[in-house]
Image (tube, rainbow, N blue to C red):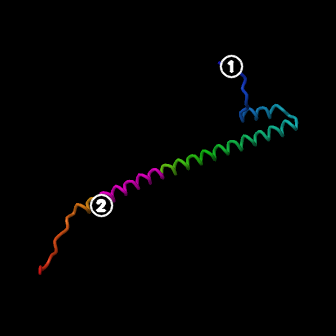
């Protein structure tokens, strides 16, 4: 079951195979440029994936910080409610 249509792009290995078949100076220079473009494209894709991973880790940290801030406010609210519930104590000592 081969491809039902002709491929519209070369892979990096296909370019290398073409380079081994063609021997003219212009073909060699063209294939060298194509290989450089493949290399740059691969480098750009890997750089973008590194950036994506960094953004995901930063996003997780920010989400965790938001949850932590909500917890702090909940604790402060609980402390404020407890402070309101505590009755005032009477003064200790002699009364005049």
Per the model, the C-alpha gap separating discs 2 and 1 is 73 Å
Residue stretch rendered in magenta on the structure: 61-78
Q: Nearer the viewer, residue 56 or 35?
A: 56
Looking at the image, which residue is at 79% across and 41% down? 33
- Which is nearer the eye, 93 or 36? 93
Q: Quadrant of the N terminus?
A: top right
Q: Report whether 93 appears left or right of 29.
A: left
- Please identify the dominant SS of the magenta region: helix
- Label disc, if present, on residue 25 of the rendered structure: none
Q: Residue at x 41, y 52 (%)?
A: 67
Vertical order, 3 against 29 (above or below): above
Instruction: Indicate whether residue 71 is drawn in magenta.
Output: yes
Query: SS of the residue at dot 1?
Result: loop
**Residue 80 marker:** 2
Q: Residue at x 15, y 76 (%)?
A: 92
Q: Give the answer, above or below, for where 69 lies relative to 42.
A: below
List x then y, in percent, for residue 73. Answer: 37, 57
Q: Earlier in the sequence, mark 2 or mark 1?
A: 1
Q: Which mark is residue 4?
A: 1
Look at the numbered discs 2 and 1 and tell me whether their residues touch, using CB distance below 8 Å.
no
The x, y position of residue 17, in whole percent, is 76, 32
Residue at the outermost front position: 96
> Toward the viewer: 33 or 69?
69
The residue carrying pointer 1 sits among few (fewer than 14), some (14 to 19) or many (20 or more) residues within 10 Å by Cα, namely few
Label 2: few (<14), some (14–19) or many (≥20) C-alpha neighbours in 10 Å: few
Q: Is residue 74 magenta?
A: yes
Relative to 85, 39 lies left or right? right
Please name whichever residue, 65 or 70, is drawn nearer the observer in this view of the structure: 70
Q: Residue at image x 13%, y 78%?
A: 93
């Amino acid at each position: 079951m081969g491809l039902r249509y002709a491929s519209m792009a070369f892979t990096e290995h296909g370019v290398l195979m073409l380079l081994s078949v063609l021997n003219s100076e212009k073909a060699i220079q063209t294939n060298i440029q194509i290989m450089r473009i493949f290399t740059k494209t691969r480098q750009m894709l890997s750089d973008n994936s590194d950036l994506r991973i960094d953004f995901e880790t930063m996003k997780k940290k920010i989400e965790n910080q938001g949850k932590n801030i909500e917890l702090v406010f909940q604790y402060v609210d609980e402390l404020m409610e407890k402070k309101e519930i505590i009755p005032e104590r009477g003064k200790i000592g002699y009364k005049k």
